Image: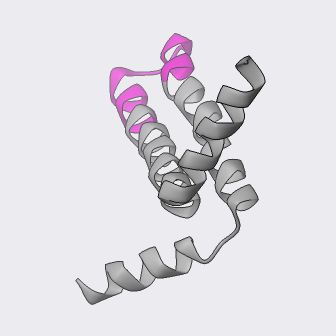
Amino acid sequence: MKWTLRIKEFLQRLSFRTGMIVLALCVPFYILSFAQMALPLSAYAKGVLWFVLFGLAKTFQYAGLTIVGVEGIKKLRRKFRRDSD
């Protein structure tokens, strides 16, 4: 369990901008995980591709949220509230 705390602490030291970039990387992997279903592949290959691509999307999502953190999310909310007023 100690190694997970070290990873979390490492990710939290990264900048807000890096967190947003990592968070944005989850979008193409979500798209690819479902778009590959249209390819003429076997059901087994589609299942493996979906598992890998969807897993990468979730990994980027959670890593990005860890990097951005609670303060970063509050910062984004304040920015969007000011822009809409």
**Which residues make up the magenta segment?**
34-49
Check residue 39 for magenta coloring: yes
Q: Is residue 53 above or below residue 70?
A: above
- Residue nearest the viewer, comparing 43 with 23: 23
Query: Quadrant where the C terminus lies?
Result: top right
Quadrant housing residue 64: bottom right
Number of numbered discs on residues: 0
The picture places residue 30, in percent across and down from the top left corner, at 53, 30
The foreground one among 10 and 49 is: 10
Q: Position of residue 29 (x, y in %)?
A: 58, 36
The residue located at (56%, 18%) in the rendering is: 35
53 left or right of 82 in image? left
Which color scheme is applied? one colour
Q: Is residue 53 left or right of residue 31?
A: left
Q: Considering only vertical position in the picture, is 1 above or below 11?
A: below
Up-down relation of residue 41 to residue 19 (above or below): above
Q: Quadrant of residue 11?
A: bottom right
x%, y% of residue 81?
65, 27
Q: Looking at the image, is 17 positioned above or below residue 61?
A: below
Q: Please give the name of the residue rendered at 34% of the width and 86% of the height, measured from the top-left corner.
A: 3
Which of the 4 image quarters holds residue 51?
top left
Quarter of the N terminus within the rendering? bottom left
Give the x, y percent position of residue 4: 33, 78
Residue under the image location 56 percent in, 16 percent down: 39
> Residue 27 colored magenta?
no
Q: Relative to the observer, which residue lies in front, 68 or 41?
A: 68
**Going 41% across and 85% down the picture, which residue do you hit?**
6
